Amino acid sequence: MRNFLRIGQGTDVMPLMAAIMRQPDLWKEDTYLRDYPQGPFGDVDSIILRFPKKIVAATAEQAEQHLASIDQHESLDTPLYAALPEARPLVMGLMSYVGGTRLGRVIINRIRPGGRITPHCDTPDHAAYYERHHIVLQSAPGVDFRCEDEHVYMGQGETWWFNNAAEHEVVNNSASDRIHLIVDVRCAR
Amino acid sequence: MITAHVESFVANIEELKHIIPLHYEELALNKDKVPLSPRWDRYAYSESIGELFFVALRDAGELAGYFIGFVAPGLHYSTCLTCIQDIFYVKPDERGAAAGKVLFDFVEKELKRRGVQRLITNSKNHFPAAWMFDRRGYEPIETIHSLWLGD
């Protein structure tokens, strides 16, 4: 495997899963990714815990000017992070384990049974700066994660690095929601 | 939706115990003399040494079929990484929706990615799948004969 690496297993994700189950309205708080125009996340619900400050630009030119004027890699905690303190030890544990020097986006994604994330590559600048990690909160056989020509099944409690600069897609052909905690970490290289 | 996945054989043994009897009933010969009795431990051993190739076909999470093969350099051809099919099966209620195509599209692509050079498959004369292999460009290369030698 060149695009996937399982870097941990046996993580106790149940405190976070239980907290998510107790607060189902969190999935409705921020639909930025799901509603992104022509984006690959139409079947995905998200709980965005850390993300760059979002702006609404009227034109592509304005968006480019905005990006040029800020540090686009700077992510901030959202109010939802405070509602899920159980996520923080998982995130900071991963930061420590991989020798992280900066924490980027932290997002919990849920793909419904039968849903998919359509093939795409992540933004090159972002993928080059941060390393993408997945901590699996819930999954079941039938979920397929493809990156280029490689396929993996990521089981509950496992932590994976993967190459999000390459084309990837996810198909959830299981009977359960597929829920992952996604953590971007800048690593010392 | 039918999808194919490389999965752990051992992790699927309990599910396989529900499907393999269907496979046996439909396709096995000499059932009065040869009862179904898989050597699960032998499969598990093959998986532990990296020889077993198990692809699960799934429909909404349920096991809908499978391909099991053994991958190793050929016994007579050490330079040729070969996959020899053990068995494959698609549940009767999953047929007719290109499930076999999904299975073998995935099997061939994944084996090629792993550097396997030759895939050897087979099908029963009394329930032939040769039409599918012909369509996919396979060549018939060998005939297997069986003789019952006694109880």
Image (tube, rainbow, N blue to C red):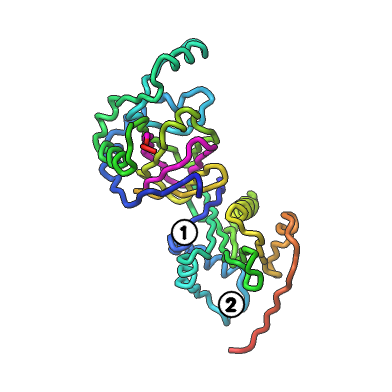
Position of residue B137 measured from the top left corner of the image (x, y, whole percent): 74, 56
Asked if marks 2 and 1 fall on the same chain, the answer is yes
Crowd tier of the residue under label 1, counting other residues whose Cα lies within 10 Å: few below 14, some 14–19, many 20 or above = some
Name the mark on residue A100. none
Corner quadrant of residue B133: bottom right
Corner quadrant of residue A110: top left
Q: Residue furthest front?
A: A189
In terms of depth relative to the viewer, which is nearer, A24 or A178? A178
Question: Which residue does the image show at 49% across and 38% down from the upper left?
Answer: A115
Position of residue A98 measured from the top left corner of the image (x, y, whole percent): 34, 42
Position of residue A35 measured from the top left corner of the image (x, y, whole percent): 46, 24
Question: Which residue does the image show at 56% across and 42% down from the upper left?
Answer: A148
Name the mark on residue B8. 1
Left or right, B96 with respect to A46, comes to right
Are dots 2 and 1 in contact, CB under 8 Å?
no
Mark 2, mark 1: which one is toward the viewer?
A: 1
Question: Which residue does the image show at 33% across and 28% down from the upper left?
Answer: A50
Q: Which residue is tagged 2?
A: B31
Chain under numbered label 1: B
